[in-house]
Amino acid sequence: MTITALPLVPDATLTNADANYYTCPVNTTAVVKRAVFTNTSASAVTITANVVRSGGSVAASNQIITSQPIAPQSTYVSPELAGLTLSAGDAIHAVASANSVVNFMASGIQIV
């Protein structure tokens, strides 16, 4: 077994349409250690995130962050994603209420 610490989402900018930002690789388990969302705009925005299990799709039942407000020029450190375990094929999806103004980074470990 090999455990590797790495950026799961090294540097992403959320869009105002749902997108997949991380998928756990085959034969791997991942654990999110920290996930940070930063609003770079002069206006408040909201973010929503889903944890989609392998073979599933985005739905209200897998929403882990729902319309979380982030003030202008502020950062949100997600307690909802911290410690989350993902199996092979599981994915983290996210969307922002405004296009291209929220940066997203997540770090963690992968176990192979």
Image (cartoon, rainbow, N blue to C red):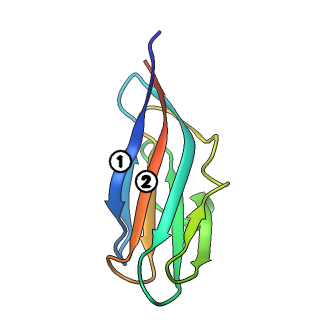
Q: In terms of secondary structure, where does tag 2 sit?
A: strand
Between the C-alphas of marks 1 and 2, the distance is: 5 Å
Q: Residue furthest front?
A: 73
Q: Vertically, is 109 above or below 23?
A: above
Name the residue: 45% across, 64% down: 94
Label annotation for residue 105: 2
Label 2 crowd (10 A; few <14 / some 14-19 / many >=20):
some
> Is there CB contact under 8 Å for labels 1 and 2?
yes
Q: Nearer the viewer, residue 6 or 14?
A: 6
Label 1 crowd (10 A; few <14 / some 14-19 / many >=20):
few
Q: Is residue 15 left or right of residue 49?
A: left
> Is residue 45 visible from the viewing direction of this image?
yes
Residue 96, position as x, y percentages in the image? 44, 75
Say how many tags the image has: 2
Q: Vertically, is 30 above or below 32?
A: above
Q: Nearer the viewer, residue 92 or 69?
A: 69
Label annotation for residue 10: 1
> Is residue 57 visible from the viewing direction of this image?
no
Quadrant where the C terminus sits is top left
Q: In terms of secondary structure, where does tag 1 sit?
A: strand
Identified by mark 2, the residue type is: Met
Name the residue: 53% across, 87% down: 44
Name the residue: 58% across, 58% down: 62
Name the residue: 43% across, 25% down: 28
Q: Nearer the viewer, residue 108 or 60?
A: 108
Identified by mark 1, the residue type is: Pro
The quadrant holding residue 61 is bottom right
